[in-house]
Amino acid sequence: MHEATEKVISAMSKAFSDVDFAPSPLVDRGDAPAGAEQIYVRVPAERLLDVMRFLRNDAACAFEQLCDLTCVDYLDFPKARDRYGVTYSLLSLSRNHRIWVKCFVNDPNPEVPSVTGIWAGAEWLEREVWDLFGVRFADHPDLRRIVTWEEFEAHPLRKDYPLRGRGERENYKVLTRESR
Protein backbone atom coordinates (compact mmCIF):
# COMPACT_ATOMS: atom_id res chain seq x y z
CA MET A 1 0.00 0.00 0.00
CA HIS A 2 1.25 3.48 -0.86
CA GLU A 3 2.54 5.52 2.09
CA ALA A 4 0.03 8.35 1.58
CA THR A 5 -2.85 5.87 1.52
CA GLU A 6 -1.57 4.28 4.72
CA LYS A 7 -1.60 7.72 6.40
CA VAL A 8 -5.17 8.35 5.27
CA ILE A 9 -6.39 4.98 6.51
CA SER A 10 -4.52 5.46 9.79
CA ALA A 11 -6.15 8.87 10.30
CA MET A 12 -9.57 7.40 9.48
CA SER A 13 -9.08 4.50 11.88
CA LYS A 14 -8.10 6.84 14.71
CA ALA A 15 -11.07 9.14 14.11
CA PHE A 16 -13.56 6.27 13.65
CA SER A 17 -12.31 3.42 15.83
CA ASP A 18 -15.75 1.75 15.71
CA VAL A 19 -15.70 1.34 11.90
CA ASP A 20 -13.95 -1.56 10.18
CA PHE A 21 -12.88 0.09 6.93
CA ALA A 22 -11.46 -3.21 5.58
CA PRO A 23 -9.05 -1.54 3.10
CA SER A 24 -8.68 -3.62 -0.04
CA PRO A 25 -7.35 -3.26 -3.57
CA LEU A 26 -9.94 -1.72 -5.89
CA VAL A 27 -8.85 -4.15 -8.58
CA ASP A 28 -7.00 -7.31 -7.66
CA ARG A 29 -4.03 -7.24 -10.02
CA GLY A 30 -1.16 -9.56 -9.26
CA ASP A 31 1.15 -7.62 -11.60
CA ALA A 32 0.78 -4.21 -9.88
CA PRO A 33 4.06 -2.92 -8.45
CA ALA A 34 4.25 -2.79 -4.66
CA GLY A 35 2.61 0.37 -3.35
CA ALA A 36 0.91 1.16 -6.67
CA GLU A 37 -2.44 -0.50 -6.06
CA GLN A 38 -5.56 1.58 -5.77
CA ILE A 39 -7.29 1.13 -2.40
CA TYR A 40 -10.92 1.31 -1.37
CA VAL A 41 -12.47 1.34 2.07
CA ARG A 42 -15.91 0.18 3.20
CA VAL A 43 -18.12 2.64 5.06
CA PRO A 44 -21.55 1.77 6.48
CA ALA A 45 -24.37 4.00 5.24
CA GLU A 46 -25.12 5.32 8.73
CA ARG A 47 -21.54 6.64 9.06
CA LEU A 48 -21.04 7.81 5.47
CA LEU A 49 -21.53 11.56 5.99
CA ASP A 50 -19.26 11.70 9.05
CA VAL A 51 -16.50 9.82 7.26
CA MET A 52 -16.83 11.85 4.05
CA ARG A 53 -16.69 15.16 5.93
CA PHE A 54 -13.60 13.90 7.73
CA LEU A 55 -11.95 12.88 4.46
CA ARG A 56 -12.59 16.32 3.00
CA ASN A 57 -11.69 18.41 6.07
CA ASP A 58 -8.88 16.52 7.80
CA ALA A 59 -5.44 17.98 6.97
CA ALA A 60 -3.87 14.54 6.46
CA CYS A 61 -6.61 13.52 4.02
CA ALA A 62 -7.73 16.75 2.28
CA PHE A 63 -9.89 15.11 -0.38
CA GLU A 64 -11.10 18.31 -2.02
CA GLN A 65 -12.53 16.65 -5.11
CA LEU A 66 -15.19 14.04 -5.70
CA CYS A 67 -14.07 12.72 -9.09
CA ASP A 68 -16.81 10.20 -9.63
CA LEU A 69 -19.74 8.55 -7.94
CA THR A 70 -21.17 5.37 -9.39
CA CYS A 71 -22.77 2.09 -8.43
CA VAL A 72 -22.23 -1.61 -9.01
CA ASP A 73 -25.00 -4.20 -8.85
CA TYR A 74 -23.46 -7.29 -7.27
CA LEU A 75 -26.46 -9.53 -7.95
CA ASP A 76 -25.17 -13.11 -8.41
CA PHE A 77 -21.59 -11.92 -7.93
CA PRO A 78 -19.49 -14.67 -6.30
CA LYS A 79 -18.98 -14.09 -2.55
CA ALA A 80 -20.94 -10.80 -2.57
CA ARG A 81 -22.67 -10.09 0.74
CA ASP A 82 -24.56 -7.03 -0.48
CA ARG A 83 -26.50 -6.13 -3.62
CA TYR A 84 -25.36 -2.57 -4.40
CA GLY A 85 -22.01 -0.90 -3.92
CA VAL A 86 -22.18 2.89 -4.23
CA THR A 87 -18.60 3.91 -5.05
CA TYR A 88 -17.05 7.33 -4.49
CA SER A 89 -13.74 8.26 -6.13
CA LEU A 90 -11.97 10.95 -4.08
CA LEU A 91 -8.90 12.96 -5.04
CA SER A 92 -6.68 15.19 -2.96
CA LEU A 93 -5.07 17.74 -5.25
CA SER A 94 -3.09 19.31 -2.43
CA ARG A 95 -1.75 15.98 -1.11
CA ASN A 96 -1.59 14.13 -4.45
CA HIS A 97 -3.39 10.97 -3.38
CA ARG A 98 -6.71 9.29 -4.01
CA ILE A 99 -8.98 6.74 -2.41
CA TRP A 100 -12.25 5.01 -3.21
CA VAL A 101 -15.05 4.69 -0.68
CA LYS A 102 -17.69 1.99 -1.07
CA CYS A 103 -21.00 2.05 0.74
CA PHE A 104 -23.00 -1.17 0.40
CA VAL A 105 -26.81 -1.27 0.56
CA ASN A 106 -29.52 -3.81 -0.15
CA ASP A 107 -33.09 -4.26 -1.35
CA PRO A 108 -35.93 -3.63 -0.81
CA ASN A 109 -35.09 0.06 -0.25
CA PRO A 110 -31.44 0.75 -1.01
CA GLU A 111 -30.58 4.19 0.32
CA VAL A 112 -27.48 6.17 1.28
CA PRO A 113 -27.21 9.77 2.49
CA SER A 114 -26.55 12.42 -0.13
CA VAL A 115 -23.04 13.92 -0.15
CA THR A 116 -24.19 17.04 -2.04
CA GLY A 117 -23.68 19.07 1.14
CA ILE A 118 -20.00 18.09 1.09
CA TRP A 119 -19.31 18.10 -2.66
CA ALA A 120 -21.93 20.03 -4.65
CA GLY A 121 -20.86 18.22 -7.83
CA ALA A 122 -22.43 15.02 -6.49
CA GLU A 123 -25.91 16.26 -7.40
CA TRP A 124 -26.01 14.97 -10.98
CA LEU A 125 -24.01 11.85 -10.20
CA GLU A 126 -26.43 10.85 -7.45
CA ARG A 127 -29.37 11.50 -9.78
CA GLU A 128 -27.82 9.21 -12.37
CA VAL A 129 -27.29 6.39 -9.86
CA TRP A 130 -30.87 6.81 -8.62
CA ASP A 131 -32.24 6.71 -12.16
CA LEU A 132 -30.24 3.75 -13.45
CA PHE A 133 -29.78 1.61 -10.31
CA GLY A 134 -32.61 2.69 -8.01
CA VAL A 135 -30.41 3.60 -5.06
CA ARG A 136 -32.00 6.58 -3.29
CA PHE A 137 -29.98 9.42 -1.80
CA ALA A 138 -31.54 10.71 1.42
CA ASP A 139 -31.79 14.51 1.64
CA HIS A 140 -30.80 15.02 -1.99
CA PRO A 141 -31.95 18.52 -3.05
CA ASP A 142 -33.49 17.43 -6.38
CA LEU A 143 -33.68 13.65 -6.79
CA ARG A 144 -35.26 13.36 -10.24
CA ARG A 145 -34.49 11.01 -13.06
CA ILE A 146 -31.75 12.24 -15.34
CA VAL A 147 -31.55 9.67 -18.17
CA THR A 148 -34.99 8.08 -18.30
CA TRP A 149 -38.32 9.82 -17.70
CA GLU A 150 -40.18 10.29 -14.39
CA GLU A 151 -42.96 7.79 -15.21
CA PHE A 152 -40.44 5.06 -16.03
CA GLU A 153 -40.81 2.46 -13.28
CA ALA A 154 -37.62 0.41 -13.63
CA HIS A 155 -33.89 0.97 -13.24
CA PRO A 156 -32.14 -0.28 -16.40
CA LEU A 157 -28.63 -0.91 -15.03
CA ARG A 158 -29.83 -3.41 -12.46
CA LYS A 159 -28.70 -6.89 -13.37
CA ASP A 160 -32.23 -8.26 -13.12
CA TYR A 161 -33.49 -5.80 -15.76
CA PRO A 162 -34.47 -7.75 -18.90
CA LEU A 163 -32.17 -7.42 -21.90
CA ARG A 164 -35.06 -6.38 -24.14
CA GLY A 165 -36.53 -3.91 -21.66
CA ARG A 166 -39.97 -3.84 -20.09
CA GLY A 167 -42.17 -2.54 -22.88
CA GLU A 168 -40.91 1.01 -22.74
CA ARG A 169 -41.53 1.41 -26.50
CA GLU A 170 -45.04 -0.08 -26.59
CA ASN A 171 -46.84 3.16 -25.72
CA TYR A 172 -45.14 5.31 -28.32
CA LYS A 173 -45.99 5.81 -31.95
CA VAL A 174 -43.37 4.37 -34.30
CA LEU A 175 -42.02 7.12 -36.53
CA THR A 176 -40.76 6.31 -40.00
CA ARG A 177 -39.59 8.49 -42.88
CA GLU A 178 -42.98 8.04 -44.53
CA SER A 179 -44.94 9.23 -41.46
CA ARG A 180 -43.54 12.78 -41.68
Image (cartoon, rainbow, N blue to C red):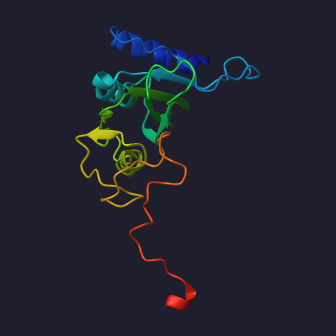
* Percent coordinates x, y for residue 51 in the rendering: 34, 24
Please count the marks in the image.
0
Q: Is residue 84 above or below residue 140?
A: above
Nearest the viewer among 20 and 152 is 152
Residue 123 pos. (x, y %): 34, 49
Residue at (33% x, 33% y) in the render: 110
- Outermost residue toward the right in this view: 31
Asked which quadrant contains residue 32, the reply is top right
Position of residue 83 relative to residue 15, above or below, is: below
| Position in image of residue 153 (x %, y %) | 34, 52
Vertical placement of 66 versus 79: above or below? below
Decide if residue 52 is on the left or right side of residue 178. left
Q: Quadrant of the N terminus?
A: top right
> Is 5 positioned to the left or the right of 19 in the image?
right
Q: Say which quarter of the image contains residue 148.
A: bottom left
The residue at 50%/47% (across/down) is 162
Q: Residue at horizontal 51%, vertical 28%?
A: 99
Q: Where residue 138 sits in the image (x, y, percent)?
A: 25, 38
